[in-house]
Amino acid sequence: MSENANPINLWKLILPIGIGVSVSAYLIATNLNLEALHSVHLSQQLVIGLLLAAVTVICRDAAFMYKMRLSTGNQLSLLKTFQTITLWEFGVCITPKISVMPFVLYLLIKSGISSGRSVAVLMLNGFFDNLAFVIVFGVLYFFIGNDILSFSFVCADLEGHKIMQGIRGFADYAWVGYLLILSACTFLGTALFIMPHATKIFFHELAEVKILTRFKSRLIFVGDEIELTANEFKNKPFSFWMKMSVATLINWVSRYMLAVSLFYAFAVTDFSFLTALSRQYVLWIFTSIPSTPGASGVAELSFIALNCEFMPVGLSTAIALVWRLYSYYLYLILGLIVLPKWAKQIAASS
């Protein structure tokens, strides 16, 4: 991506918001039970659950800031780090999954990180994010077993909703997504820490394949940057890797605990916290499938489809909208606040 290219335009803002609002309106019209909503009263459990949800947001962003500072070698001030992670999350909200990395690369370069270092930051964070997912999912499976992918179709809020029933049925194949993430983690780990030079040669040779000639420069660039990234981080002390690991775990477990906190806030019966937590890993696989910008629409429908048994009948739509407010609309709003000031700073420094 060119350093002068601007990946942000009006349609990238309007489209995800429009899709998200449309799906929310559909869910409210077809699935919101006003009687169930009226049954919600201010209670100690509700207050604690909503406060815990807010704490998860603070923890995930604080951990994200910390690992960003670590991986950039503290080149960014605290304010710039906050701007960077806010706009990173904002980028996730307004672009499809396949377009997020070019956006973040542009963001890092414009924030004052060299292009080589920016690619290193992306690769390292990508590796740790995938590794955290693989390890925690494996640990949860060890404790819970097949309950991680045990989906009963007896769920009142899904009656008459063929799409959500289909999503719940398709969740049995979540292992395919897990294996893909495991493969990506294995590839990145091997490329960065075991055979960086061999990986570089592999990409250079791949660039010579006739059907891939249109991607030749990109493939050569990726190969070169993998070796540069490996050299960048190979002499880091053990403490660096431990700090990155802990920060990544806190970041991602906090993201998934948001939903569990909301289930607790509105719960009328007991539910398994571990099962509810593990279900968010399955949900992440669904929202990671390249689809709409920010997974708008897909996220709301998948959230209800995969978590309906943890929510009181009639309240799944309301809880899904609160979850989306914490995990999506918050970053849209913060991004729209931070973006103009960040853009002025970039323009002034150019």
Image: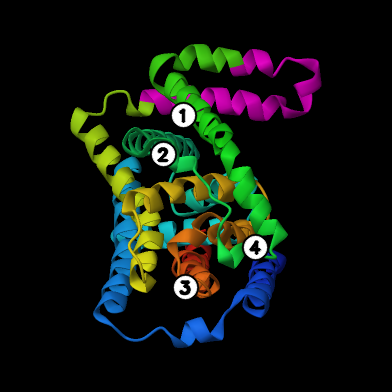
Residue 262 seen anywhere in this rendered image of the structure: yes
Rendered location of residue 322, percent (x, y): 47, 73
User: Where residue 322 is drawn, which disc sits there?
Assistant: 3
Tell me which label, 4 or 3, sits earlier in the chain.
4
Task: Look at the image and say whether residue 214 sits in the magenta stretch.
Answer: yes
Corner quadrant of residue 263: bottom left
- Which residue matches tag 2? 133
Nearer-the-camera pick, 215 or 3: 215
As drawn, is 118 to the left or to the right of 290? left
- Which residue matches tag 1? 185
Q: CA–CA distance between discs 4 and 3?
A: 14 Å
Rendered location of residue 249, percent (x, y): 31, 44
User: Where residue 297 is drawn, which disc sits there?
Assistant: 4
- Which span of residues is magenta-colored? 203-231
Amino acid beneath label 3? Val
Q: How would you rate the neighbour count of disc 3 (Cα within 10 Å): few for under 14, some for 14-19, many for 20 or more?
A: some
Q: Residue at x 61, y 63 (%)?
A: 158
